[in-house]
Image (cartoon, rainbow, N blue to C red):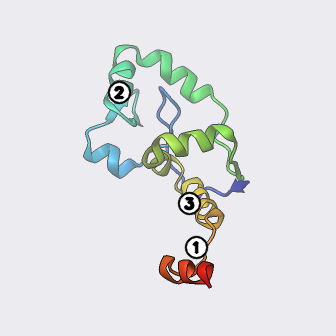
Amino acid sequence: MTTTPTTDRPRDPVCGMAVRIDAATEDGLVAEHDAHTYYFCREGCLAEFRGDPARFVTSHHDAAPAPTGPIEIDQGMRLWYESCSCCLSDSHPEVKAALDAEREAAQAPADPGICEVAEAEQATS
């Protein structure tokens, strides 16, 4: 299964997670370095960046750009969805939506059947 990203989000230079600028700004997860603004997904990544920004700036700027085509939903994405779908939603809302729809479609509708009393009467008749 593949999905197409719906938004362009900057990547956390420490872990590579896509970050919502508004949420990172509101939570104070922003750092300036060499006239560039960096956004982080959590305090731990921000603290690690502040400890040695050159280590992450180099890898961040030299890294290949994030893919812009469809995202492959592999077993790792499915495990992420099962363990923490809210984090997956923050990073890849289109993947969470696709997996939500997949889960909903997989649930078979309940067979109305008959009530237990009527079933017991049928068995004795």
Which comes before the other along the chain, label 2 or label 1? Answer: 2
Which label sits on residue 118? none
State which quadrant residue 95 falls in. bottom right
Q: Label 3: which residue?
A: 100
- Callout 1: few (<14), some (14-19), or many (20+) C-alpha neighbours within 10 Å? few
Residue 6 in picture, x, y percent from top left: 57, 60
Q: Secondary structure at mark 2?
A: helix
Residue type at mark 3: give it.
Answer: Asp
In the displayed structure, would residue 113 be above or below residue 35?
below
Residue type at mark 1: give it.
Answer: Ala
In the displayed structure, would residue 98 be above or below residue 110?
above
- Callout 2: few (<14), some (14-19), or many (20+) C-alpha neighbours within 10 Å? many
Q: Quadrant of the C terminus?
A: bottom right
Q: Label 1: which residue?
A: 110
Q: Residue at x 50, y 37 (%)?
A: 17
Residue 93 in picture, x, y percent from top left: 52, 55
Q: Residue at x 49, y 23 (%)?
A: 57
Q: Label 2: which residue?
A: 46
Q: Residue at x 58, y 65 (%)?
A: 104
